[in-house]
Each structure stands twice: as C-alpha cells, then as structure tokens.
Image (tube, rainbow, N blue to C red):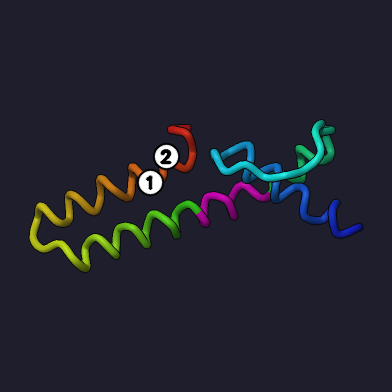
Amino acid sequence: MSGERAVRPWRVALTLFTVIPMAGRAGLDRREAARALLWLPAVGALLGAVAAGVLLAVQAVADGAAGRLLAAVLAIGTVAALTGAL
C-alpha cells in the first residue's frame, strides 16, 4: 500500500467526523469508506484526549464545585466545537 493510500482513511475519518479540514483528493469509494470507519475509535480517542486536557487544565486553575462545573462545560464544549456538534 502506498503512503498516500495508507494515510487517506485516517484523513477521511477525521474530515467526516470533525470540523478539521484535511487536504486530499475528492471522491470516496466504498473500500476507502470502509477503511475510514475502522479509524473512528482513534478519532474518538483523539477527541477524548483533547477534552480531557481541557478538563484537567481548567481544574488545575479553578477551585471548588464551580471550577469543576466550568471544566466540564468547557470540555464538552470543546468536543462539540471540534465535531460541529455531531
């Protein structure tokens, strides 16, 4: 499998399920779509890691129940923004 063909399913999955634009050729056949679906758990893990980073960063600077609530709202908002509220 060539380098472009190996990376394309990851790009397709990232583009389809987030608002992050990825460069690449237009068009998608069934085989590429099937390979892209296999990358969905990795895309979800990436989004979860970003949200966890936001949560931990906000909790580190904010104290109390209000700080935890703010951290949770910002973490969920981050995921919503990155996925286009998907």
Q: Position of residue 23 (x, y in %)?
A: 72, 44
Task: Name the residue tied to disc 1.
Answer: 78
Q: Quadrant of residue 1?
A: bottom right
Q: Amino acid at mark 2?
A: Ala
24, 56: nearer the viewer: 24
Residue at horizontal 21%, vertical 63%?
59
Residue at horizontal 24%, vertical 60%?
58
Instruction: Determine if the magenta segment contains residue 13.
Output: no
Q: Are marks 2 and 1 in contact (CB under 8 Å)?
A: yes
Task: Name the residue tied to disc 2.
Answer: 81
The residue positioned farthest toward the bottom in the image shown? 60
Q: Position of residue 18 (x, y in %)?
A: 55, 40
Tell me the crowding category of disc 2: few under 14, some 14 to 19, or many 20 or more residues within 10 angstroms, Cα based.
Answer: few
Q: Is residue 86 left or right of residue 20?
A: left
Q: Is residue 16 left or right of residue 33?
A: left
Q: Does 79 appear above or below 27?
A: below
Real-space Cα distance between discs 2 and 1?
5 Å
Instruction: Determine if the magenta segment contains residue 43.
Output: yes
State the SS at label 2.
Answer: helix
The residue positioned farthest toward the right in the image shown? 1
The magenta segment is 39-46
Residue at horizontal 29%, vertical 64%?
56
Q: Is residue 32 left or right of residue 14?
A: right
Q: Amino acid at mark 1?
A: Thr
